Image (cartoon, helix red, strand yellow):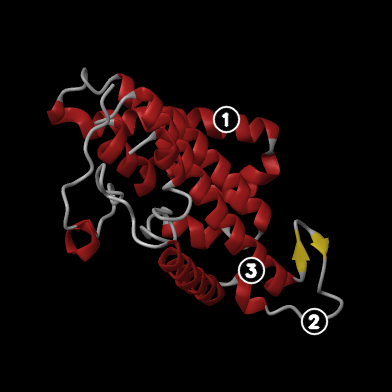
Amino acid sequence: MNKLQTFTKGIIRENPVLRLVLGTCPALAVSTEAVNGIGMGIAATVVLVLSNTIISLLRNVIPDKVRIPAYITIIAGLVTVVQIVIKAMAPSIDTALGIYLPLIVVNCIILGRAEAYAAKNPVVYSILDGLGMGIGFTLALLCMGIIRELLGAGTLFGITITANVIAPMTIMVMAPGGFFVFGILIALINKLEKKLGPVDRSSGSACAGCPSADMCGANEQAPEKEVEA
């Protein structure tokens, strides 16, 4: 898999939220407004890129028996720094995200990419993988936030759009509305995936990190190979 494929796979084909169905708890909780989705997405992307970088650099140093505690320690330190920066520069975003910002530490997307990719591949590829997955996560939250805010409050980024024309559907900013939008987006991304055609697996599987890879008929070939440095 080349560098471009490594970067772009997380945006559509392996979108962490809409394809791998990871990180759904923060996705549903904070996507009531578009700005919250962007804030959470950027924070997670920064942590993803930095954690992938550090773990890739230390992949031959960290003992296998303590790799998970080591990963969590690295991620927790990065999340703490990110949270401090957000509190200082965007306190309103920090308040809106609430507990879900520090909970990035246990976000399965972050730990999953560390274990499935960064611990097995060189730094450049790990950075591109983290960046692509982070952008995919951000776009998923942004799409959910736009739809839910527009239909549920009649606003977009706090600006009144349809509130004076159509009565806002409050249910869209509640849990049922979140699940509804989530399901619709998954259906759309699956439809788009079919139009894109089958994945070229000549250089390895594009399913690395997918929790359902063992049960998927598309993953019959050899698993993703490590990228040579």
Residue toward you, 42 or 90? 42
| Residue 48 makes an appearance in the image | no
Q: Position of residue 46 (x, y in %)?
A: 51, 34
Q: Residue 148, labelled with which disc?
A: 3
Secondary structure under the numbered disc 1 in the rendered image: helix
Mark 1 or 2: the one toward you = 2
Structural crowding at the residue carrying mark 2, measured as other residues with C-alpha within 10 Å and reported as few (<14), some (14–19) or many (≥20): few
Disc 2 residue type? Answer: Ile
Work out how far the residue at label 1 is from the one at label 3, CA to CA, in angstroms.
28 Å
Residue, disc 1: 84
Mark 1 or 3: the one toward you = 3
Picture quadrant of residue 228: top left
Secondary structure under the numbered disc 3 in the rendered image: helix
Secondary structure under the numbered disc 2 in the rendered image: loop
Q: Position of residue 27 (x, y in %)?
A: 50, 58
At a point 68% along the width and 39% down the height, the residue shown is: 91
Residue toward you, 149 or 2? 2
Q: Residue 166, labelled with which disc?
A: 2
Picture quadrant of residue 219: bottom left
